[in-house]
Amino acid sequence: MATQLRRSLLTLIFICWAISSTSSDQVGTSYGDSDQIRSLCISDRFIMESYFTTTHTSLDDSEFRNFLLHQQCSSDKIPSEHDPNIVPATSLIQHRNVTGEGSHRNLLTSIKLLPLYLEFQLQELVILERLPLGVFADPFELQSIQQRRVFSDVSVFGDTNLELPSFRSNRSVVEIHVEVSPRDYENGEISLKLPLHARYQPLDDSGYSRVEFGEPDLFLCSSHVQNHQHEQRRCLVLSIGRSKTETRSVFWDIPAGIRGHTEYVSALTFAAAVLSAISILVASVLSSKVESCKNSKQS
């Protein structure tokens, strides 16, 4: 009886130790998750400027999340799931859609501002659109939009070479700043339209290349003060591109060359080049004959 009791006690101790060990591991994983980020302290004008001025040369989602973890304000604590200041991302993104035709489209986004954010006295909504491969935003076009005061500030980071095809390019990020006021909270929503353009896509048997847009990263920040290089501004994290949301993914089917047509296109291109060369040669010969006739008549 004593032996059986001892075995039962040892088994119970082992189970408790295993549960404790598992819970510890889960807490560590949860602490490293970007969903635990509550606010950031940024010294640069743009959040992505701080990312690319470090050791990062291209956009990587996991590296970006680690970057955000290191930018947390030192006074922050890990928020509880019952914290009233933490609002699920599903209540922020109301609508996402790609409109337009051809290789030039607009990405439409409607963002809901919740009244509880008004108490933080943060005047700038920051949207980070991490664009997929095969799509880019024209920095010059965005500057003209900013001059019309649609955005308070906007910039493109990452691969800004507009001429590269999709298979030779890297991803880019558009950071948009929009000033918010108490009136925006009363209206409830802010709508954004981001013009996008398609790169030359790789060959595909279907004739189309599909790109998928994830959710944007949303922050509510204090205004940037000019000529204050060492002053950090605080940004409240509203959402960091979560995958499990009520909004559906947004897709754009970009026309691409069909692999089976490459031989026909190559043959037609070669024939057109040969005919063009012959036409130029004939035109030059005829032109020289006309000149010689004119000279003989004048003499």
Image (spheres, grey):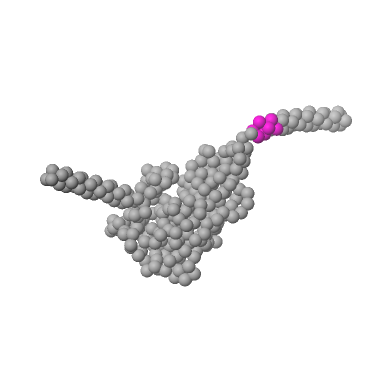
Residue 159: give x, y in percent of width and height.
Answer: 49, 44
Question: Is any part of residue 2 visible from this angle?
Answer: yes
* Quarter holding residue 121: bottom left
Q: Which residues are magenta?
A: 261-268
- The question of residue 263 being in magenta is answered with yes
Name the foreground residue: 79 vs 117. 79
Outermost residue, right direction? 297
Name the foreground residue: 213 vs 64. 213
Q: Is residue 120 above or below residue 24?
A: below
Residue 16: give x, y in percent of width and height.
Answer: 22, 49
Residue visible at 35% across and 58% down in the picture: 39
- The question of residue 72 being in magenta is answered with no
- Left or right side of 89 for 286: right
- Left or right side of 128 for 104: right
Quadrant occupied by the C terminus: top right
Residue 5: give x, y in percent of width and height.
Answer: 15, 47
Name the foreground residue: 9 vs 40. 9
Q: How many marks?
A: 0
Outermost residue, front direction? 1
Residue visible at 30% across and 57% down in the picture: 78
Residue 6: give x, y in percent of width and height.
Answer: 14, 45
Question: Is any part of residue 175 visible from this angle?
Answer: no
The kind of secondary structure the magenta stretch mainly shows is helix
- Left or right side of 65 for 76: left
Quadrant occupied by the N terminus: top left
Residue visible at 57% across and 43% down in the picture: 209
* Quarter holding residue 228: bottom left
- Left or right side of 8 for 102: right
